[in-house]
Image (tube, rainbow, N blue to C red):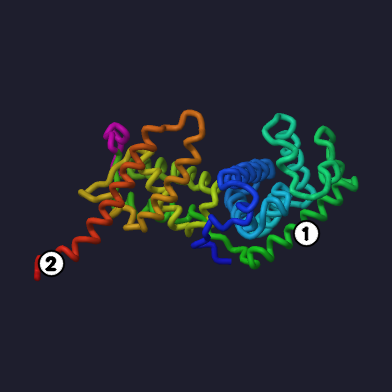
Amino acid sequence: MSVKHFDVSQLPSLEHMTAKEEAQRRMKTVRFIEETCRLLRLPRVATATATVFFHRFYAKHSFETHDRFEVAVAAILLAAKTEESPKKLNVVIEEAYKLKTRNIQTGRLSQAATDASPEPASAVHPATTAALDPKSDEFSKLRERVLLLERVILHTIGFELSVTHPYKYILEFSQRAITKKQVEFVNPEETRGVSTSQAQVQLTNKVVQIAMNFANDSFQTSLCLQAAPDQIAIACMYLAFEFAGTRPTQMKTWLEVLGYPEVEQLISICCQIMDLISERKGSDEAMFSKIKATLEKMKDEVVISADEPAAKKIKAA
Protein backbone atom coordinates (compact mmCIF):
# COMPACT_ATOMS: atom_id res chain seq x y z
CA MET A 1 0.00 0.00 0.00
CA SER A 2 1.73 3.18 -1.15
CA VAL A 3 1.08 6.08 1.24
CA LYS A 4 3.88 8.41 0.20
CA HIS A 5 1.69 10.80 -1.74
CA PHE A 6 -1.70 10.13 -0.16
CA ASP A 7 -4.16 12.99 -0.65
CA VAL A 8 -5.70 13.54 2.79
CA SER A 9 -8.50 15.59 1.21
CA GLN A 10 -9.81 12.25 -0.12
CA LEU A 11 -10.14 10.51 3.26
CA PRO A 12 -13.41 8.50 3.35
CA SER A 13 -14.57 10.00 6.67
CA LEU A 14 -14.70 13.50 5.14
CA GLU A 15 -17.99 12.52 3.51
CA HIS A 16 -19.52 12.53 7.00
CA MET A 17 -17.54 15.16 8.96
CA THR A 18 -15.27 18.17 8.63
CA ALA A 19 -11.50 17.85 8.22
CA LYS A 20 -11.07 19.23 11.74
CA GLU A 21 -13.41 16.64 13.24
CA GLU A 22 -11.65 13.88 11.32
CA ALA A 23 -8.25 15.06 12.58
CA GLN A 24 -9.57 15.24 16.16
CA ARG A 25 -10.77 11.63 16.02
CA ARG A 26 -7.38 10.51 14.74
CA MET A 27 -5.55 12.44 17.45
CA LYS A 28 -7.72 11.19 20.31
CA THR A 29 -7.58 7.58 19.16
CA VAL A 30 -3.80 7.68 18.72
CA ARG A 31 -3.51 8.98 22.29
CA PHE A 32 -5.66 6.03 23.36
CA ILE A 33 -3.33 3.68 21.46
CA GLU A 34 -0.26 5.26 23.06
CA GLU A 35 -1.68 4.98 26.57
CA THR A 36 -2.84 1.39 26.05
CA CYS A 37 0.60 0.42 24.73
CA ARG A 38 2.18 2.07 27.76
CA LEU A 39 -0.04 0.02 30.07
CA LEU A 40 0.93 -3.09 28.11
CA ARG A 41 4.62 -2.09 28.37
CA LEU A 42 5.11 -2.37 24.64
CA PRO A 43 8.25 -0.83 23.09
CA ARG A 44 7.90 2.55 21.41
CA VAL A 45 8.40 1.04 17.96
CA ALA A 46 5.37 -1.22 18.48
CA THR A 47 3.29 1.80 19.50
CA ALA A 48 4.42 3.66 16.39
CA THR A 49 3.61 0.69 14.17
CA ALA A 50 0.14 0.38 15.72
CA THR A 51 -0.58 4.04 14.96
CA VAL A 52 0.59 3.64 11.35
CA PHE A 53 -1.70 0.61 10.93
CA PHE A 54 -4.55 2.66 12.39
CA HIS A 55 -3.92 5.64 10.09
CA ARG A 56 -3.60 3.41 7.01
CA PHE A 57 -6.82 1.61 7.88
CA TYR A 58 -8.76 4.87 8.06
CA ALA A 59 -7.18 6.04 4.82
CA LYS A 60 -9.41 3.43 3.20
CA HIS A 61 -12.35 3.18 5.63
CA SER A 62 -14.64 5.70 7.28
CA PHE A 63 -14.92 6.30 11.01
CA GLU A 64 -18.67 5.85 10.46
CA THR A 65 -18.17 2.25 9.35
CA HIS A 66 -15.91 0.77 12.03
CA ASP A 67 -15.61 1.47 15.77
CA ARG A 68 -12.28 3.28 15.99
CA PHE A 69 -11.44 1.95 19.44
CA GLU A 70 -11.95 -1.63 18.39
CA VAL A 71 -9.80 -0.93 15.33
CA ALA A 72 -7.20 0.54 17.70
CA VAL A 73 -7.18 -2.65 19.78
CA ALA A 74 -6.78 -4.77 16.64
CA ALA A 75 -3.96 -2.49 15.42
CA ILE A 76 -2.14 -2.85 18.77
CA LEU A 77 -2.52 -6.62 18.68
CA LEU A 78 -1.15 -6.82 15.13
CA ALA A 79 1.69 -4.34 15.75
CA ALA A 80 2.82 -6.20 18.88
CA LYS A 81 3.20 -9.37 16.82
CA THR A 82 4.89 -7.51 13.96
CA GLU A 83 7.48 -5.94 16.26
CA GLU A 84 8.15 -9.25 18.05
CA SER A 85 6.51 -8.16 21.31
CA PRO A 86 3.32 -10.25 21.18
CA LYS A 87 0.62 -9.88 23.82
CA LYS A 88 -2.27 -12.21 24.57
CA LEU A 89 -5.51 -11.06 22.99
CA ASN A 90 -7.43 -11.16 26.26
CA VAL A 91 -4.79 -9.02 28.00
CA VAL A 92 -4.87 -6.39 25.25
CA ILE A 93 -8.68 -6.25 25.31
CA GLU A 94 -8.84 -6.01 29.12
CA GLU A 95 -6.30 -3.17 29.34
CA ALA A 96 -7.86 -1.25 26.47
CA TYR A 97 -11.35 -1.70 27.89
CA LYS A 98 -10.29 -0.54 31.37
CA LEU A 99 -8.65 2.56 29.88
CA LYS A 100 -11.68 3.32 27.74
CA THR A 101 -13.97 2.89 30.73
CA ARG A 102 -11.86 5.28 32.84
CA ASN A 103 -11.88 7.86 30.04
CA ILE A 104 -15.68 7.68 29.77
CA GLN A 105 -16.16 7.91 33.53
CA THR A 106 -13.83 10.93 33.83
CA GLY A 107 -15.48 12.71 30.90
CA ARG A 108 -12.42 12.54 28.64
CA LEU A 109 -14.43 10.41 26.21
CA SER A 110 -18.13 10.24 25.40
CA GLN A 111 -19.85 6.88 24.98
CA ALA A 112 -21.47 8.05 21.75
CA ALA A 113 -18.10 8.96 20.24
CA THR A 114 -16.94 5.36 20.42
CA ASP A 115 -19.90 3.74 18.71
CA ALA A 116 -19.68 3.35 14.93
CA SER A 117 -21.85 0.24 14.80
CA PRO A 118 -25.53 0.45 13.81
CA GLU A 119 -26.34 -1.66 16.88
CA PRO A 120 -27.50 0.10 20.06
CA ALA A 121 -24.61 1.15 22.29
CA SER A 122 -25.79 -1.13 25.07
CA ALA A 123 -25.55 -4.11 22.72
CA VAL A 124 -22.06 -3.24 21.55
CA HIS A 125 -20.47 -2.15 24.81
CA PRO A 126 -21.27 -3.35 28.32
CA ALA A 127 -22.14 -0.83 31.00
CA THR A 128 -19.08 1.32 31.59
CA THR A 129 -19.33 1.01 35.36
CA ALA A 130 -19.05 -2.78 35.29
CA ALA A 131 -15.94 -4.90 34.96
CA LEU A 132 -15.54 -6.76 31.71
CA ASP A 133 -15.81 -10.45 32.53
CA PRO A 134 -13.59 -12.56 30.19
CA LYS A 135 -16.19 -15.33 30.46
CA SER A 136 -19.12 -13.14 29.45
CA ASP A 137 -20.88 -13.10 26.10
CA GLU A 138 -19.99 -9.42 25.73
CA PHE A 139 -16.29 -10.24 26.01
CA SER A 140 -16.59 -13.10 23.54
CA LYS A 141 -18.35 -10.87 21.01
CA LEU A 142 -15.77 -8.13 21.47
CA ARG A 143 -12.99 -10.69 21.08
CA GLU A 144 -14.51 -11.94 17.81
CA ARG A 145 -14.87 -8.40 16.47
CA VAL A 146 -11.25 -7.58 17.27
CA LEU A 147 -10.00 -10.76 15.58
CA LEU A 148 -12.11 -9.97 12.52
CA LEU A 149 -10.80 -6.39 12.44
CA GLU A 150 -7.23 -7.67 12.65
CA ARG A 151 -7.85 -9.54 9.40
CA VAL A 152 -9.57 -6.52 7.84
CA ILE A 153 -6.56 -4.35 8.72
CA LEU A 154 -4.23 -6.88 7.12
CA HIS A 155 -6.21 -6.83 3.88
CA THR A 156 -6.53 -3.04 3.97
CA ILE A 157 -2.76 -2.48 4.26
CA GLY A 158 -2.07 -5.13 1.64
CA PHE A 159 -0.27 -7.33 4.18
CA GLU A 160 2.60 -4.78 4.25
CA LEU A 161 3.69 -5.29 7.85
CA SER A 162 7.18 -3.84 7.58
CA VAL A 163 7.00 -0.20 8.68
CA THR A 164 9.90 2.23 8.71
CA HIS A 165 9.64 5.05 11.23
CA PRO A 166 11.36 8.47 11.39
CA TYR A 167 13.43 7.42 14.43
CA LYS A 168 16.24 5.70 12.50
CA TYR A 169 16.64 8.71 10.20
CA ILE A 170 16.74 11.09 13.16
CA LEU A 171 19.67 9.16 14.62
CA GLU A 172 21.49 9.01 11.28
CA PHE A 173 20.93 12.67 10.46
CA SER A 174 21.89 13.95 13.90
CA GLN A 175 25.14 11.99 13.85
CA ARG A 176 26.04 13.36 10.43
CA ALA A 177 25.17 16.99 11.13
CA ILE A 178 26.72 17.18 14.59
CA THR A 179 29.80 15.07 13.87
CA LYS A 180 30.57 17.36 10.93
CA LYS A 181 30.04 20.34 13.26
CA GLN A 182 27.36 21.84 11.04
CA VAL A 183 25.42 23.18 14.04
CA GLU A 184 26.31 24.74 17.37
CA PHE A 185 24.55 26.17 20.42
CA VAL A 186 23.70 29.86 20.04
CA ASN A 187 24.50 30.35 23.72
CA PRO A 188 28.13 29.30 24.44
CA GLU A 189 27.22 28.85 28.11
CA GLU A 190 25.52 25.59 27.13
CA THR A 191 28.90 23.87 26.74
CA ARG A 192 31.23 26.03 28.80
CA GLY A 193 33.83 24.05 30.72
CA VAL A 194 33.44 20.80 28.76
CA SER A 195 35.64 19.22 26.09
CA THR A 196 34.75 19.31 22.40
CA SER A 197 33.73 15.64 22.44
CA GLN A 198 31.59 16.15 25.53
CA ALA A 199 29.98 19.19 23.92
CA GLN A 200 29.09 17.11 20.84
CA VAL A 201 27.54 14.42 23.02
CA GLN A 202 25.58 17.04 24.95
CA LEU A 203 24.34 18.66 21.75
CA THR A 204 23.45 15.31 20.17
CA ASN A 205 21.53 14.10 23.22
CA LYS A 206 19.52 17.30 23.51
CA VAL A 207 18.64 17.57 19.81
CA VAL A 208 17.82 13.88 19.39
CA GLN A 209 15.53 13.84 22.43
CA ILE A 210 13.58 16.84 21.19
CA ALA A 211 13.41 15.45 17.64
CA MET A 212 12.15 12.08 18.93
CA ASN A 213 9.42 13.89 20.86
CA PHE A 214 8.36 15.71 17.69
CA ALA A 215 8.36 12.41 15.80
CA ASN A 216 6.10 10.93 18.49
CA ASP A 217 3.79 13.95 18.14
CA SER A 218 3.66 13.48 14.36
CA PHE A 219 1.87 10.15 14.83
CA GLN A 220 -1.13 12.02 16.23
CA THR A 221 -1.63 13.52 12.78
CA SER A 222 -2.00 11.88 9.36
CA LEU A 223 1.59 12.81 8.41
CA CYS A 224 2.59 9.16 8.02
CA LEU A 225 0.10 9.07 5.11
CA GLN A 226 1.39 12.27 3.54
CA ALA A 227 5.18 11.97 3.68
CA ALA A 228 7.98 9.44 3.80
CA PRO A 229 9.59 8.77 7.20
CA ASP A 230 12.89 10.40 6.19
CA GLN A 231 11.04 13.59 5.22
CA ILE A 232 9.26 13.63 8.58
CA ALA A 233 12.61 13.02 10.31
CA ILE A 234 14.23 16.02 8.60
CA ALA A 235 11.35 18.26 9.67
CA CYS A 236 11.58 16.95 13.25
CA MET A 237 15.34 17.58 13.23
CA TYR A 238 14.89 21.15 12.03
CA LEU A 239 12.31 21.84 14.75
CA ALA A 240 14.63 20.24 17.30
CA PHE A 241 17.58 22.38 16.18
CA GLU A 242 15.47 25.50 16.68
CA PHE A 243 14.01 24.45 20.03
CA ALA A 244 17.45 23.36 21.29
CA GLY A 245 18.78 26.84 20.60
CA THR A 246 21.26 26.00 17.85
CA ARG A 247 22.36 27.61 14.59
CA PRO A 248 24.25 26.55 11.46
CA THR A 249 28.02 26.93 11.48
CA GLN A 250 30.55 27.71 8.71
CA MET A 251 28.23 30.34 7.16
CA LYS A 252 25.82 27.58 6.14
CA THR A 253 22.06 28.01 5.78
CA TRP A 254 19.50 25.68 7.32
CA LEU A 255 18.75 24.33 3.85
CA GLU A 256 22.39 23.28 3.47
CA VAL A 257 22.45 21.65 6.91
CA LEU A 258 19.20 19.81 6.18
CA GLY A 259 20.48 18.52 2.85
CA TYR A 260 18.23 20.66 0.65
CA PRO A 261 14.87 18.97 1.36
CA GLU A 262 11.75 19.75 -0.66
CA VAL A 263 10.82 23.03 1.04
CA GLU A 264 7.04 22.94 0.56
CA GLN A 265 6.98 19.48 2.13
CA LEU A 266 9.23 20.63 4.98
CA ILE A 267 6.96 23.60 5.69
CA SER A 268 3.83 21.46 5.60
CA ILE A 269 5.22 18.88 8.04
CA CYS A 270 6.62 21.47 10.45
CA CYS A 271 3.40 23.49 10.46
CA GLN A 272 1.21 20.43 11.10
CA ILE A 273 3.37 19.42 14.06
CA MET A 274 3.43 22.98 15.42
CA ASP A 275 -0.34 23.33 15.00
CA LEU A 276 -0.77 20.14 17.04
CA ILE A 277 1.46 21.16 19.93
CA SER A 278 0.35 24.82 19.92
CA GLU A 279 -2.92 23.68 21.51
CA ARG A 280 -1.06 22.55 24.63
CA LYS A 281 -0.68 24.72 27.69
CA GLY A 282 2.61 26.55 27.91
CA SER A 283 3.43 26.21 24.22
CA ASP A 284 6.06 28.68 22.98
CA GLU A 285 4.15 30.87 20.55
CA ALA A 286 7.14 33.16 20.03
CA MET A 287 9.25 30.19 18.93
CA PHE A 288 6.51 29.03 16.55
CA SER A 289 6.40 32.50 14.94
CA LYS A 290 10.19 32.57 14.61
CA ILE A 291 10.25 29.13 12.97
CA LYS A 292 7.46 30.00 10.54
CA ALA A 293 9.34 33.16 9.52
CA THR A 294 12.53 31.13 8.96
CA LEU A 295 10.62 28.59 6.87
CA GLU A 296 9.30 31.38 4.67
CA LYS A 297 12.87 32.62 4.19
CA MET A 298 13.87 29.12 3.11
CA LYS A 299 11.14 29.23 0.48
CA ASP A 300 12.52 32.55 -0.78
CA GLU A 301 16.05 31.06 -0.89
CA VAL A 302 14.81 28.27 -3.15
CA VAL A 303 13.08 30.75 -5.48
CA ILE A 304 16.23 32.90 -5.70
CA SER A 305 18.51 29.90 -6.34
CA ALA A 306 16.11 28.67 -9.04
CA ASP A 307 16.26 32.06 -10.77
CA GLU A 308 20.07 32.31 -10.71
CA PRO A 309 20.77 30.03 -13.73
CA ALA A 310 18.32 31.99 -15.89
CA ALA A 311 19.90 35.27 -14.79
CA LYS A 312 23.34 33.98 -15.70
CA LYS A 313 22.14 32.95 -19.16
CA ILE A 314 20.67 36.43 -19.78
CA LYS A 315 23.92 38.05 -18.67
CA ALA A 316 25.97 35.77 -20.95
CA ALA A 317 23.79 36.60 -23.91
Front-lying residue, 34 or 20: 20
The part of the image, by quadrant, that contains residue 191 is top left
Disc sitting over residue 75 in the figure: none
Q: Quadrant of the N terminus?
A: bottom right
Which span is picked out in magenta? 186-196
User: Could you say where residue 75 lies in the image, as x and y percent from the top left?
Assistant: 68, 54
Q: Quadrant of the C terminus?
A: bottom left
Front-lying residue, 277 or 98: 277
Q: Amino acid at mark 1?
A: Leu
Q: Amino acid at mark 2?
A: Ile
Q: Magenta stretch containing residue 64, yes or no?
A: no
User: Could you say where residue 23 lies in the image, as x and y percent from the top left?
Assistant: 57, 46
What crowding class fits label 2: few (fewer than 14 Cα within 10 Å), some (14-19), or many (20 or more)?
few
The part of the image, by quadrant, that contains residue 258 is bottom left
**Does residue 153 appear in this view?**
yes
**How many numbered marks appear?**
2
**Does 284 appear above or below 257?**
above
Viewed as shown, does residue 245 lie left or right of 211? left
What crowding class fits label 1: few (fewer than 14 Cα within 10 Å), some (14-19), or many (20 or more)?
few
**Does 65 appear above or below 184?**
below
Viewed as shown, does residue 261 lie left or right of 10? left
Mark 1 touching mark 2, by CB under 8 A? Answer: no
The residue that mark 1 highlights is: 148
The residue that mark 2 highlights is: 314
At mark 2, the secondary structure is helix
User: Could you say where residue 159 lies in the image, as x and y percent from the top left?
Assistant: 65, 67
Residue at screen point 20% across, 49% down? 251
At mark 1, the secondary structure is helix
